[in-house]
Image: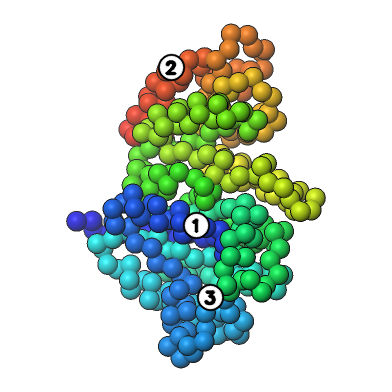
């Protein structure tokens, strides 16, 4: 029997579809993990005196009233997580986005009291968020704007990063289309090194099949962060302004994924130029991440192997190196 429960605080905007992702992680745990929804807890507390409060109209309340309800909800969550038979994902958010701006919900003191082992910021493409929200009765009459949803997502990540640093915990950015084994391994396989996979999004589907096959082989050794977990380029954006903020956030998010990793694998199965891959390789190498390059071609220039620690033209040799690095990480706790 475990002495202490593992607690993860999961932050995201409304409509992010993160609950589906979290439920898949719960299924992987065979019931070992329980989800506690912060907003549901606040509404449950509010309904004791006002049965008309719902997630849809909760932000209409006076800010001080919301604060008191939130404090009671946090107390309830702390009591529930004292049950050591389970591990917990506390699903919530750092703020409401209401009438064009953020309303603070959680404070540094709240997160200190919940005392999570780490935080995650779940991220979706704002087009998906708008589609999801429009399907919900409580949001159908509201003017939902993709640009505002993108801003809200940025606020959630920024706030979670600040708070996590203050309490000396990690905040991991995870896309809602990520493989659920990523979060499961963050909880239960902390001996594995974390790896960001960099590749050209211009690859054709047949090359993604090869990439996916490679990822299946190395997941036994690594915790993987895949940039495809937040789709970007296949969407049509209603305005240039929305496309610009999504593209800018994509760059910052992918660099965040590198910064939360121990190593970066550059997977170039095809000779397709990618400014993103070049930038990610430079960032990884210049910030001290172990940087491995898969380049299965005979001819290359002097810059190809320069900004990497090791280059491989054979996938089997690369996997062998990954296995060795994983064993070294397990023994020493770092690469």
The residue wearing badge 2 is 317
Q: Position of residue 97 (x, y in %)?
A: 64, 69
Q: Nearer the viewer, residue 100 or 30?
A: 30
Which scheme is used to colour this image of the protein? Answer: rainbow
Q: Is residue 100 left or right of residue 289?
A: right
Q: Which residue is mark 3?
A: 55
Left of 74 or right of it: where is 177? right
Identify the mark nearer the N-term, 3 or 1: 1
Q: Quadrant of the C terminus?
A: top left
The kind of secondary structure element at disc 1 is: helix
Q: Position of residue 95 (x, y in %)?
A: 58, 68
Image marks 3 and 1: residues in contact by CB distance under 8 Å? no
Question: Relative to residue 246, is residue 311 depicted above or below?
Answer: above
Element class at badge 3: loop
Residue at 37% of width from left, 24% of height from top? 324
Decide if residue 80 is on the left or right side of residue 205. Answer: left
Q: Residue furthest right?
A: 240
- Residues at marks 3 and 2, CA–CA distance in whole angstroms: 52 Å
Q: Nearer the viewer, mark 2 or mark 1?
A: 1
Crowd rating for badge 1 (residues with CA inside 10 Å; few <14, some 14–19, many 20+): many
Q: Which mark is residue 154?
A: none
Q: Along the polypeptide, which appears first: circle 2 or circle 1?
A: 1
Please state if 184 lies on the left or on the right of 132 as rendered: left
Disc 3 from disc 1: Cα separation: 16 Å
Q: Residues within 10 Å of mark 2 (few under 14, many from 20)?
A: few
């Amino acid at each position: 029997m475990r002495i202490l429960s593992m607690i993860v605080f999961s932050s995201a905007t409304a409509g992010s579809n993160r609950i589906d992702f979290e439920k898949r992680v719960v299924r992987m745990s065979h019931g070992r993990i329980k989800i506690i929804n912060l907003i549901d807890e606040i509404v449950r507390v509010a309904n004791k005196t006002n049965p008309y409060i719902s997630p849809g109209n909760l932000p209409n309340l006076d800010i001080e009233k919301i604060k008191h309800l939130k404090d009671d909800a946090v107390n309830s969550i702390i009591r529930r997580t004292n049950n050591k038979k389970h591990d917990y994902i506390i699903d919530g958010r750092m703020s409401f986005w209401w009438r064009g701006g953020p309303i603070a919900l959680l404070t540094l003191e709240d997160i200190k009291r919940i005392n999570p082992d780490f935080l995650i910021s779940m991220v979706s493409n704002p087009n998906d968020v708008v589609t999801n929200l429009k399907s919900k009765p409580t949001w159908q009459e509201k003017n939902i704007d993709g640009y505002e949803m993108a801003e809200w997502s940025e606020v959630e990540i920024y706030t979670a990063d600040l708070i996590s640093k203050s309490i000396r915990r990690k905040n991991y950015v995870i896309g809602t289309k990520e493989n659920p084994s990523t979060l499961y391994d963050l909880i239960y396989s902390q001996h594995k090194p974390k790896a960001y996979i960099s590749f050209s999004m211009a690859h054709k589907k047949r090359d993604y099949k090869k990439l996916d096959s490679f990822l299946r082989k190395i997941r036994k050794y690594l915790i993987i962060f895949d940039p495809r977990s937040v789709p970007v380029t296949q969407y049509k954006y209603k305005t240039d302004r929305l496309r610009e903020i999504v593209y800018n956030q994509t760059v910052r998010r992918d660099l965040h994924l590198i910064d939360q990793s121990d190593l970066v694998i550059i997977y170039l199965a095809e000779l397709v130029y990618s400014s993103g891959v070049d930038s990610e390789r430079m960032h990884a190498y210049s910030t001290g991440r172990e940087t491995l390059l898969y380049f299965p071609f005979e001819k290359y220039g002097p810059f190809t192997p320069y900004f990497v620690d090791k280059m491989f033209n054979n996938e089997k040799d690369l996997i062998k190196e990954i296995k060795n690095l994983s064993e070294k990480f397990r023994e020493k706790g770092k690469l």
